[in-house]
Image (cartoon, helix red, strand yellow):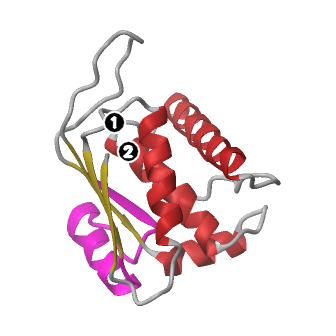
Amino acid sequence: MSIDVNNESGTEVDEQAILDIARYALTRMRIHPLSELSVIVVDTAAMEQLHIQWMDLPGPTDVMSFPMDELRPPKKDDEEPPQGLLGDIVLCPEVAEKQGQEAPTRHSMDEELQLLTVHGVLHLLGYDHEEPDEKAEMFGLQAAIVDGWRAEKGHTGPSPAPTVS
């Protein structure tokens, strides 16, 4: 799997953890191992510009996803996953830090960025949270992936509650 992490934010983030959890999520979702993903970490000004341009919403947000080939996880175990460009995930550490501090299970900026990376991957794979049933499916899957990755890494304690809107 080709995953590029490009930090343009000026904030120090755990790029290796972002890379690792993205790879874990894509593997768990059975995405073709030759697929490509780009993760870009930006400051609030850049995120606000993207948020206005693409969503017509004011202010910066935590994560945005820009799908390319609209890859989807295989529905059957014996189905071969398609190969292609997943797209871009854009993260904003300043928003992530604030959300982590305000979450019921207070957690670090890096923990929030890990959660947001999985959230972005799921959006690239066609998951959404507009309807209650979609939200339950997506956030359940998101928690399972984050918990699974953290268990593999030896992280103990509860995973951060979803704080993305």
Query: Could you say which is closer to the camera, residue 31 or residue 153?
Result: 153
Residue under the point 20% across and 33% down: 83
Rendered location of residue 4, percent (x, y): 30, 62
Q: Which amino acid is tagged 2?
A: His
What is the secondary structure assignment of the residue under circle 2? helix
Residue 49 visible to an observer of this rendering: yes
Q: Magenta stretch containing residue 52, yes or no?
A: yes
Against 20, is 25 above or below? Answer: above
Residue under the point 34% across and 33% down: 31
Rendered location of residue 91, percent (x, y): 41, 68
Q: Which mark is residue 126?
A: 1
Residue 165 visible to an observer of this rendering: no
Q: Which mark is residue 159?
A: none
Residue under the point 34% across and 86% down: 45
Residue under the point 28% across and 18% down: 80
Q: Which amino acid is tagged 1?
A: Gly
Residue 76 lies left or right of residue 72; in this view the side is right
Q: Quadrant of the N terminus?
A: top left
Q: Magenta stretch containing residue 3, yes or no?
A: no
Rendered location of residue 16, percent (x, y): 49, 66
Rendered location of residue 87, percent (x, y): 24, 51
Q: Are marks 1 and 2 in contact (CB under 8 Å)?
A: yes
Which corner quadrant of the image does residue 107 belong to? bottom right
Which corner quadrant of the image does residue 151 belong to? top right
Give the spatial CA distance, label 1 vs label 2: 5 Å
The magenta stretch is 42-66
* Residue under pointer 2: 123
Residue 79 lies left or right of residue 144; in this view the side is left
